[in-house]
Amino acid sequence: MSVMTIERKILEKNDEIARRNRAIFIFHKTFVINLVSSPGSGKTSILERTLERFNGSFKVGVIEGDVQTDFDAQRIAKHTPWVVQIVTNGGCHLEANLVEDALSKLDLSGMKALVIENVGNLVCPANYDLGEAHKVVVLSVTEGEDKPLKYPAMFRRASVLLLNKVDLLPHLRCNVELMKNNALSINPSLEIFETSCVTGKGIDAWCEWIRARLM
Amino acid sequence: MSVMTIERKILEKNDEIARRNRAIFIFHKTFVINLVSSPGSGKTSILERTLERFNGSFKVGVIEGDVQTDFDAQRIAKHTPWVVQIVTNGGCHLEANLVEDALSKLDLSGMKALVIENVGNLVCPANYDLGEAHKVVVLSVTEGEDKPLKYPAMFRRASVLLLNKVDLLPHLRCNVELMKNNALSINPSLEIFETSCVTGKGIDAWCEWIRARLM
């Protein structure tokens, strides 16, 4: 079998399991987000601020994907008891079967929302459906305006872009309008929120986006 | 053939071509760096500042690896005529055969140094030897102190860590000593330079590190 054939078969198998995961989420009326970004863009911090805002008003679960360590699950466990860590041991992205395994450790009954925090990688996770309702991509304004054009697949497949760390804008040479226009040129239907976990900017609007989609 | 077997065979084939590349570099007395990092850590900016410092005093080549676009090659072409762009079309890392192909477009004779700027990805490029003398990893201080622990393979395989964007430290909640200690706990022989492409801090020391290794 050729490498191309193997890759196609892996993706087909992944998509089949993702469809199964999606059916389970819909059955439980759980709204599921696949949160993706480069390393260090602020996924975990945004998730912490988000859980703080929701403040236990409904049941939220989190699946944490990391190459190594359970640091992120430890941070999230301060905000919700429903958190599962997946350590990929070198794997560069989450796959649907890893999420399926994690679901056996999460009680989905009454869980209104579930956030799957993917491995920090702006390339590989774009290709793997996990069964989520939406991919949400986080991009730090420190990363440069050109990133949506250089890593287009992720921006094409995401529904929302969280433009994070905007508190740093006064100290950067970053044209945030150009950054947004670059993202919109790849995906015109992308919904964009400017966020800061330091000042709290945009977190309310982002939380409202989630609330409006709960089943 | 199993997926594991295919993966092993790909890596074995890659290592064989990398050995061939390395022999070519040694024959030409070309010192080769494989520059790796997350997207937006500042690899291209550091390379621009580095080429400015060398100011044509010896022949330096650059191979630019990107998922899409030739923006980086355009930036680098202002500083050296010896630049080749590799577009991986979705591929998440450079492989030795792509570098081998690029070498057919670069005249190595008299080339004292060659920098291969890898795809922005802190996971996958760690596994692929390109034939370089050293891997150099760039980490922006905006990415958080925990990154060496969360993405250990890259830090384990690198000889140098460029801790970049230190001009932003006054505006960040970042403990730079903790960040360094985390990196050194993964790889005690890592040489660390704090750099800023805005203030120029550390660029001279980093350039000296390269100069001392020219053949």
Image (spheres, coloured by chain):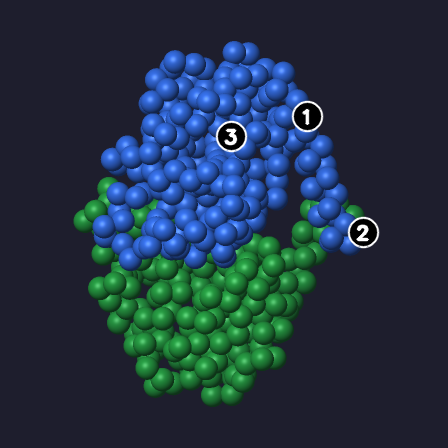
Chain colours: A green, B blue
Chain letter belonging to callout 1: B
| Earlier-in-chain disc, 2 versus 3 | 2
Horizontal and vertical percent for residue A12? 66, 60
Residue B113 x/y as whole percent: 49, 21
Residue A126 seen in this snapshot: no
Q: Position of residue A181 (x, y in %)?
A: 30, 48
On the image, numbered disc 1 is attached to which residue? B20
Q: Residue furthest right?
A: B1
Q: What distance separates the C-alpha of mark 3 from that of mark 1?
A: 16 Å
**Category of crowding for the residue at label 1, using alpha-carbon neighbours closer than 10 angstroms: few (below 14), some (14–19), many (at least 20):** some
Please state, as top left, top right, bottom left or bottom right, where the C terminus of chain A lies in the image: bottom left
Q: Earlier in the sequence, mark 3 or mark 1?
A: 1
Do labels 3 and 1 touch, CB within 8 Å?
A: no
Q: Secondary structure at mark 2?
A: loop
Q: Circle 3 sits in a helix, a strand or a loop, which is it?
A: strand
**Three-letter code, disc 1:** Arg
Asked which quadrant contains residue A113, the reply is: bottom left
Q: Badge 2: few (under 14), some or many (20 or more) residues near its Cα, within 10 Å? A: few
Residue B175: which quarter of the image?
Answer: bottom left
Of residues B119 and B207, which is closer to you in this image? Answer: B207
How far apart are labels 2 and 3 at the CA level?
35 Å
Q: What is the number of the mark on residue B33?
A: 3
**Residue at x 61% of width, y 30% of height:** B131
